[in-house]
Amino acid sequence: MGRVDGKAMFVHGALPGESVRARLIDRSRKHDEAVCVEVLSPSAERIEPECPWFDHCGGCALQHLEHDAQLHWKDKRLVDNLMRLGGVEADEWIEPLAAEPWYYRRRARLSARLVRGKGRVLVGFREPQGRFVADIGDCRVLHPDFSDRLLSLSELLGDLTIADKVPQVEIASGDQGSAIVIRNLEPLSDQDLDRLRQWSSRENIAVYLQPKGPDTVFRLAPEHHELSYRIPEFDLELAFHPQHFVQVNAAINRKLIMRALDWLDPQESERVLDLFCGLGNFTLPLATRAAHVTAIEGAAELIEAARGNARRNGLDNIELDVADLSEDVSGRSWYRAGFDAALIDPPRSGAFEVLPMIAGSGASRVVYVSCNPATLARDAGELVTRHGFRLARAGIADMFPHTAHVESIALFERS
């Protein structure tokens, strides 16, 4: 970020401390956006991006920065947010969780667009300014099942009779298989359906269709298919639907689970509250250590998936409930039972509304997994100044290497 005549400007492809020549691509009331055209004075941490499409693809923002420097930048961003926005400082800053920074992304939503001037359907992330689909041939952050299949998907969609009516393709990979979800704005012909089945059989990737809203998704091929991932440290396996939320980086997810349980340290006699539990990513590992886990989620389909995963793994000490966590749920019977510890993994908007409930639950330890350092900082300030906790530990997890996304984890202990 730099400033031009006092107004903030975000420059894609530039690094802190550099002098660059940039081209303006977008204006808004609070800031402008630009792309780097020429580096006049480079940073010592600048490297040549490995991806040949980096300059015109918005899927990554930091490939031109050494990976260790990316971790340092994200770590500093977390610290700055906690201190500046939350007014709190951790007793202990923990080393980042990191893993192989390439071919890690097992879930993504890719844009698709028929560009007649190029004679094909473009499939991939959007350009940095977000208006057009980037013309790329491969992607080195996508799971290996998809990193070299963008042109195959392009050809597949281009052969459909409704090639101009497919705006997006969602991709999802488990440990032993992958799937795509095609958003089709108009009905497919029988010939189209045959093409999709043949592609599925040839590529060994399941094909789902979404003719309208998310509740209309159905599997076209093959007849039987399931996505799942293992958490070997706890001998667990979790099944998921291609559109379910899962942490996109399998290696970092396992490390994050291990750190969360290490910090929370649930005992065999304790009751644990898991809020925003999803399909049981933290719930099931917690249940292998604690006496009882109460897991709450706002989406009924995710609770049903969590229930199925609990049965699949033979865990009967889990109570699951659907609840809107933006509302007061302190009247629920499961809340009145009280808890020894809590884990929360909220969306980007954070967990501000549930903080009083957590404080009143009796939990002496709270692990907060965050995908937004700004809302974590806000909530940390509330937990510390209003609810009698202290920030014992905090650190980042490199869930999205080469992007500006900051995943973090924090431990709060009752003062």
Image (cartoon, rainbow, N blue to C red):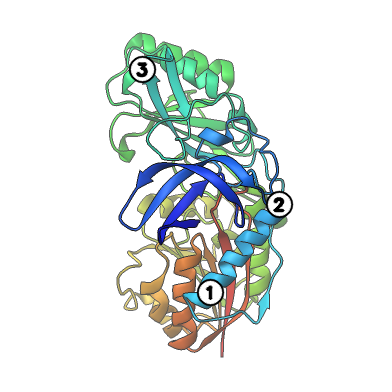
Of residues 252 and 82, which is closer to you in this image? 82
- Callout 2 secondary element: loop
Q: Three-letter amino acid code at disc 3?
A: Ala
- Count of picture labels: 3
Residue 203 horizontal/vertical position (percent): 58, 19
Would residue 342 be seen by someone viewing this image from the given angle? no
The residue beneath circle 1 is 82
Q: Three-letter amino acid code at disc 1?
A: Leu
Q: Three-letter amino acid code at disc 2?
A: Glu
- Residues marked 3 and 1 touching at CB (< 8 Å): no
Distance of label 1 from label 2 (alpha carbons): 25 Å
Q: Is residue 354 above or below residue 72?
A: below
* Residue depicted at 48% across the width and 19% down the height: 154
* Residue depicted at 59% across the width and 32% down the height: 139
The residue beneath circle 2 is 45
* Residue depicted at 48% across the width and 77% down the height: 86
Would residue 339 be seen by someone viewing this image from the given angle? yes
**Crowding near pointer 1: few (<14 within 10 Å), some, many (20+)?**
many
Which mark, residue 20?
none
Which mark, residue 163?
3
Q: In this view, does 310 lie above or below 343?
A: above
Distance of label 2 from label 3 (alpha carbons): 43 Å
* Sequence-earlier tag: 2 or 3: 2
* Sequence-earlier tag: 3 or 1: 1
* Sequence-earlier tag: 1 or 2: 2
Left or right of residue 242, residue 139 in this image? right
Image quadrant where one finds the C terminus: bottom right
Q: Is residue 103 above or below residue 65?
A: above
- Residues marked 2 and 3 touching at CB (< 8 Å): no
Nearer the observer, disc 1 or disc 2? Answer: 2
- Callout 1 secondary element: helix
